[in-house]
Image: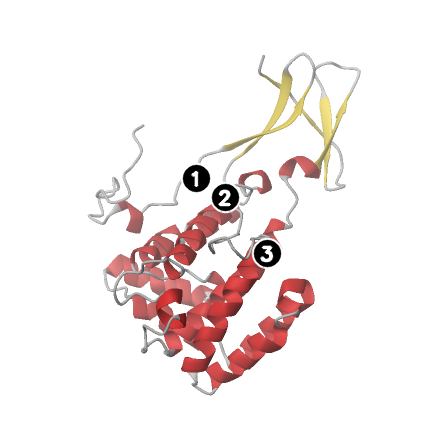
Amino acid sequence: MQKQQRNAPCACGSGKKFKYCCDGKNQPDKYLKIYENDNGEELSLIIKNDALNEALHADTVLKNFCKDNFLYFFSSALTSNDTNFLHKKLKDGTLSRNDFITAYKQNTSFEEMERVVKGCSDELEIFKKRQQIILDAVGAHHQKKYNLSVPVFLAQLEGLLRDYGNLDRTANIKSTIPTEIWGDKLLDFMKIDSHYFRDYISEIFKGNPEDGRFNRNSILHGWDLSYGTEEQSLILFLLIIEIRMFDFFKRTPDYKDRFEVKRYDNPFAVGFTFKGRKQISLSIKYNK
C-alpha cells in the first residue's frame, strides 16, 4: 500500500489534509524479538492494538498543526478536556494558534509553575543548581515582567540542554534530547515528540532567524525589542519543563530488559517472565 502523503487530501474522504485528519491512526503491529538461539530460532512477541501508543498517537494531528504554526504541543500543559476541544476545532476548521496559548495559560498558574520547578530540582541535578534562577524568572513572569523572564528562561534553557547532553560550551546549541531510543522502550509517540522538540529548538536558536520570528540571537543581541510577551515567556518555561518529561520516559527500561527467557527440554517450548509475573509459554517464530 502506498504511503499517504502528509499534505495530500486524506484517503478517508474528509477533504482535509492527511496530516490534520488521519495521521497517527492505525498504528502497525509491532514484532519484538525477545529470544534467539544459536540455530537461528527466534521468539517474537506481536503487539496488537497498543492502547497507550494508539491513544497518544491520536494527538499527532494537533502536533502537526503546532509545527506548521511555529508552536510546540505541550501535553503536560493540557487537560483531556482541552485536547478534546482542540480536536473538535481542528475538525471544524476553526483551530488557531491562540487556542493552544489560551489553554497553556489557563493550566499554568504561578503556584503550579513553582511546584513543577521544585519537582524538577528534586529529580535532576541540572535543575537543582538552577532552581533559584528559574524561580526568580517565574516570579518575574507572574509579575508580568516578561522583559526580564524571557532572557533568563532562554539562557537557562540553553544551559539545561548543554548539561543534559554534555554539549561542549563551544559547540552550537541544539536539542540534546535523544530521538532514536524510543522504539526499544515501546514509546513510539516519544519518537515523534523528540523530533518535533528538536526542530522547535533549532528554530529558536537558529543563527539567521526569519524576520519577526522569536529567536535567541535576536533577543540576546538586542535586535528584537518586542520580545517581552506573556506568550513567549510561558513557551520558554514549558520548554524547560519538557526536558524533565523526556528524562522521565528515557528512564523506562528497553523492552528486552523486561524479559527473562528460559528454554525447556521440549525444543519447541520457551517460557519467559515479564516483570516478575507468572511464567507464560509461547511458541517460537522461526527465522533462519
Q: Are marks 3 and 1 in contact (CB under 8 Å)?
A: no
Which mark sits nearer the N-terminus, 3 or 1? 1
Which-is-in-front pick, marks 3 and 1?
3
Q: Secondary structure at mark 3?
A: helix
Residue, disc 2? 188
Lateral position of residue 200 relative to residue 253, left or right: left
User: Which amino acid type is marked by label 3?
Assistant: Tyr
Say if residue 3 shows up in the picture: yes
Q: Position of residue 131 (x, y in %)?
A: 62, 73
Residue, disc 1? 27
User: Which amino acid type is marked by label 2?
Assistant: Asp
Query: Vertically, is 256 above or below 175?
Result: above
User: Which amino acid type is marked by label 1?
Assistant: Gln
Say few, some or many: other residues with alpha carbon within 10 Å of mark 1 (under 14 / 14 to 19 / 20 or more).
some
Tell me which residue sits at (56%, 53%) in the image: 168
Residue, disc 3? 164
Report the front residue among 196 and 153. Answer: 153
Tell me which residue sits at (28%, 64%) in the image: 95
Q: Tell me the CA gap for discs 3 and 1.
A: 31 Å
